[in-house]
Image (cartoon, rainbow, N blue to C red):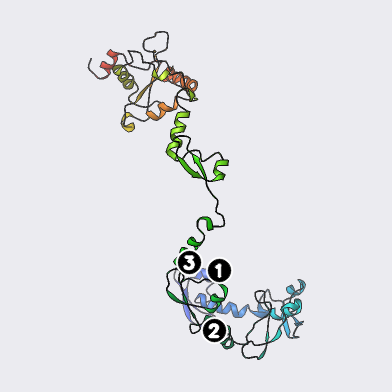
Amino acid sequence: MPKVPVTCQECGKEFLIYKSKIQQGGGKYCSKECSYKAKSRLYSGENSPYWVERIIRKCRTCGKEIQINPSRAKENKGYYCSKSCYSQDVDPAFQRISKNCQFCGKEFSTKPTTHRPKGANYCSRECFLNGAGKNFSGKNRIKNVCPVCGKEFESFPMRVKKSEILYCGRECYAIDQSRRFSGKDHPRYKEKIIRKCQNCGKEFEEYEYRIKDNRGIYCSKRCQNIAFGESVKGDKNPLWRGGVSFEPYCPKFNNEFRSRVRTYFEYKCLLCGKSQKENGKKLCVHHVNYKKEACCDEDIPRYFVTLCVSCHAKTNNNREKYQKQFEKMIEKRFGGKSFFHKKEQLSHYGVI
């Protein structure tokens, strides 16, 4: 569709536009700038559809005439021309007061504030610099000697008035503080009590609060670990089974039999699924019934599984739970079988 030439209603410039936009009510202005200028002129002041005549009032403090919207009059607002007039009328503490300048003695009016309730002390910036500003200028600095390193340095007069001891830097301050408040000179210092280690008999110092909390029994972590190891050794351990781990395995439970079990389960852990290569060690062959004579005794079910080292350690706790779990897995998934016979192993490798 070809464009049609149109004249801009704001600047009079000709521009091209589609007929469809003119039919939709557009195409009056050549750009957004002309559109904004025309709208601000046509819809400002009384021409605006939201125009409301303002109400004229007099300021309660200074009597100056002010114009306010009727909405502010309904909300009981618009009685003051400025914040200063409002503060003087509402809170007498913030009214302007007359004072004499501390440097030149000239009388001037000042307004109290929250951080300076008594008002300003100087009538101008020049008087402030000549009066209080002397403490901040480089000309009036005082020479001092650092008590730690003996270095000469300059400081403001205000610092000399406030502090008894001055330092040249933060490092010297930290050195002096650590020297003055270390050991018995520290306000929170507490004496240590001499004790004997219950493991090696060596004397050591310990705080009283640690002794009350049933700590400070051993001189080091090493002695603590040795004593703990002795306290849970043998029949003192809650997992003690009467020395079953020291009993010998059935003679049929040899390396050749264990390899048949590993081959049957394809060299994978039955709990986590890790292969023997991922584990980095040979898989453990676990007795499901926790009986070492299972290979030789025909009355005991010959159930075995392959487990990695970490999973094999887990089976020492909750033995009944793991026994039932492994028995169900062998019966359902493997048909009650948990190892190859000798001929089956040979055929599995393709020897027979």
Residue bearing mark 1: 24
Label ID, residue 173: 3
Label ID, residue 211: none
Quadrant for the N terminus, please.
bottom left
Q: Residue 49 vs residue 337: left or right?
A: right
Tell me where residue 217 appears, x and y as whole percent.
50, 38
- For badge 2, the amino acid type reads Lys
Picture quarter containing residue 229?
A: top left
Q: Nearer the viewer, residue 162 or 269?
A: 162
Q: Please, what secondary structure does the residue beneath circle 3 have?
A: helix
Disc 1 to disc 3: CB gap under 8 Å: no
Residue 269 appears anywhere in the view? yes
Tell me where residue 263 appears, x and y as whole percent.
31, 21
Tell me where residue 145 appears, x and y as whole percent.
46, 75
Of circles 1 and 3, the one toward us is 3
Which of the two labelled residues, at mark 2 and mark 3, occupies the earlier sequence position? 2
Q: Nearer the viewer, residue 2 or 21?
A: 21
Of circles 2 and 3, the one toward us is 3
Residue 82 appears anywhere in the view? no
Q: Nearer the viewer, residue 204 or 329?
A: 204
- For badge 3, the amino acid type reads Tyr
Q: Residue at x 31, y 18 (%)?
A: 260
Residue bearing mark 2: 134
Q: Please, what secondary structure does the residue beneath circle 1 have?
A: loop
